[in-house]
Image: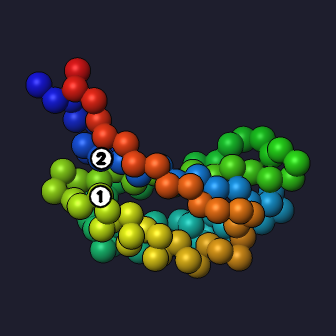
Amino acid sequence: MQAVSPMGRHALFIYYRVRDVHADELMAAATAMQITLQAAHPALDVRLLRRPEAQEGLHTWMETYGLPPDADPAALAADVERAARGLAPWLVGARHVEHFVACAS
């Protein structure tokens, strides 16, 4: 039997760095972006996380997206990246996108 994570069979994990002085602006923009994505994809499970400590004035942020079983991971990843263009003013470096699948138990 295949185990299904609470986030679905496929999940996207996207991490990037932002100057700690821009945490509030990034959080507002990323939260708004995820609300918009969830409105377009109602079964999408979203989370926004940040490491608690800054290193050299930078925080690492992570967006997670649990895809519904019928979702196309590549298409949804493209939607997320299009939506994330608005975050560019706060990013230091690239966004790193990782795609994972739930493992069988």
Determine whether 43 is above or below 29 in the image: above
Q: Quadrant of the C terminus?
A: top left
Circle 1 is placed at which residue position?
A: 73
Callouts 2 and 1 close, C-beta under 8 Å: yes
For the N terminus, give its image quadrant: top left
Please tell me which residue is depicted at 68% across the width and 43% down the height of the picture. Answer: 51
Instruction: Give SS at disc 2.
Output: strand
Mark 2 or 1, nearer chain start: 2
Amino acid at circle 2:
His
| Residue depicted at x 53% and y 66% | 31
Q: Is residue 100 left or right of residue 27?
A: left
Question: In x, y percent, where is residue 104?
Answer: 22, 26
Residue 13 relative to residue 54: left or right: left
The amino acid at mark 1 is Pro
Q: Residue at x 74, y 63 (%)?
A: 92
Choose top left, top right, bottom left or bottom right for residue 78. Answer: bottom left
Q: Report the disc number at residue 17.
A: none
Identified at 70% across, 66% down, the residue is 91
Q: Position of residue 102 (x, y in %)?
A: 29, 35
Question: Which residue corresponds to mark 2?
Answer: 10
Q: Position of residue 12 (x, y in %)?
A: 41, 51
Residue at the right extreme of this rendering: 56
Q: Is residue 35 visible?
A: no
User: For residue 53, what is the image quadrant?
Assistant: top right
**What secondary structure is marked by label 1?**
helix
Left/right of residue 103 with respect to residue 36 in the rendered view: left
Graded by Cα atoms within 10 Å as few (under 14), some (14 to 19) or many (20 or more), the crowding at tag 1 reads some
